Amino acid sequence: MENYTVILVIMALMIGASGIAEKVKIPVPVLLLLVGIGVGFVPAMPGIELNPDIIMLLFLPPLLYDAAFNISFAEFRTNRNTIGTLAIGLVFLTTAGIAVTAHYLIAGLSWPLAFVLGAILSATDAVAAMGITKGLGLPHKTVTILEGESLVNDASALVAYRFAVAAVTGIAFVWWKGIVQFLIVLGGGFVIGVVMARILAYTLRYFKGNAMVVASLLLLMPFVTYLVAEHFHVSGVIGVVVLGLGMSRLSREKFPEKFKEQSRYFWEVITFLLNGLIFLLIGLQFPLVLKHMASAQIWPFIGYAAIITAVTIVIRLIRVYLQQFDLQRAFEGKRKVSEDALFDSKTSFIITWSGMRGIVSLAIAIGLPVTLENGAPFPMRNEIVFLSIAVVLLSLLGQGLTLPWIVKRLKK
């Protein structure tokens, strides 16, 4: 009964805070984070330890599917060069940048541990990007780049993380094996997504006269696709994204307007609840993590987190502006770059400032092994988890609170 009461309290807080955020013109995810942190410090509130596998399975598939379903496939294809650069190249560049910073900044943090931290914080988050930028009136191109990047980059970050953890446990890293595994993870996820989209399309044609069955299948399939992909050790994220893109195309061609309207409302409710819950739960984790840190470490590590957050922004700023200039040179050199793929400096800055960390970083951090294979404790685990959650909070609160103001100023 106690757990049931806690769930109801959290749901009520989430719905109430979301409504208030709209009234006071604060981004909903930001207010939910603040509420979660505040409630987490209430003595009567029991600690809610999140299971990272549950986070990845319960929240990621429907939210990624919905984002991929609603993204413009034509604009995604037009901006694939920028999306690929940010979702793959920038992830590994950010991993290295954070690792170098953390290694020289934090005493006792070895190179393998520094790369673990870098991999955890390397990817921007689709949920955060959609939650913060919603309602800001950003151009479709900007939204497509942000969502496309954050839909794909999770796979890159997870591969980097696996190799970093392997290095901590003493397994030698072979670069060519890493590249091969990365391609297998991405390619395998793509294949699973295509196959599951074909299966779903065939099944929907069979049940096309039953709207409830069709809607239920559309809800179920992202979870099934994610599980199937993860079972074969390929990217469940990519699988779900490909499924969403495939269903979006099928919807435009085959679904009747009445069903599309009903389906849109249904998914809006689902994403509203899941988005709200995940940001509230991220906030609730901070007080729990504080308990595992020595009091003398807290403020220095918050300072480290602030520096790491700044480093991620600077690296992203440089890479996004380089991409802007690279596209311009390629277009002027009459290489295969569409004029629609070009963007200006204002868009570059908005893309930079919108790159926030979120649910995936949180789940990976909490899922760090407690012990090594020889039974020894995973070195500096509490410190890495604390830094990861602190960077996520600083990223979401700092960039999230200022992004509406920045967008407003740049529009002038």
Image (cartoon, rainbow, N blue to C red):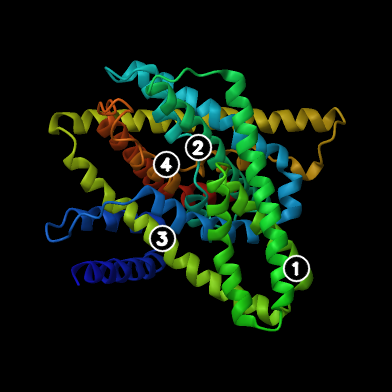
> What amino acid is labelled 2 in the image?
Leu
For the point 44% across and 20% down, the residue is 171
Judge depth for marks 4 and 2 and give the one in front: 2
Q: Which residue is mark 1?
A: 252
* Foreground of the two, 330 or 62: 62
Q: Residues within 10 Å of mark 2 (few under 14, many from 20)?
A: many
Horizontal and vertical percent for residue 377? Answer: 25, 28
Near mark 3 (Cα within 10 A), the count class, few <14, some 14-19 or many ≥20, is many
Q: Amino acid at mark 3?
A: Val
Disc with the residue nearer the chain's start (1 vs 4): 1
Q: Report helix, strand or loop for mark 3.
A: helix
Q: Amino acid at mark 4?
A: Ser
Choose between 35 and 241: the one closer to the eye: 241
Distance, label 1 to label 4, CA atoms, is 34 Å
Q: Which mark is first along the chain, 3 or 4?
A: 3
Give me the residue at 54% from left, 74% from top.
Answer: 266
The residue that disc 3 covers is 28
Decide: is 335 above or below 266.
Answer: above
Q: Which callout, 4 or 2, points at the residue further toward the start of the chain?
A: 2
Give the residue type that dot 1 points to.
Arg
**Marks 4 and 2, how far apart in space?**
10 Å
Q: Residue at x 62, y 43 (%)?
A: 347
Please tell me which of labels 1 and 2 falls first in the chain: 2
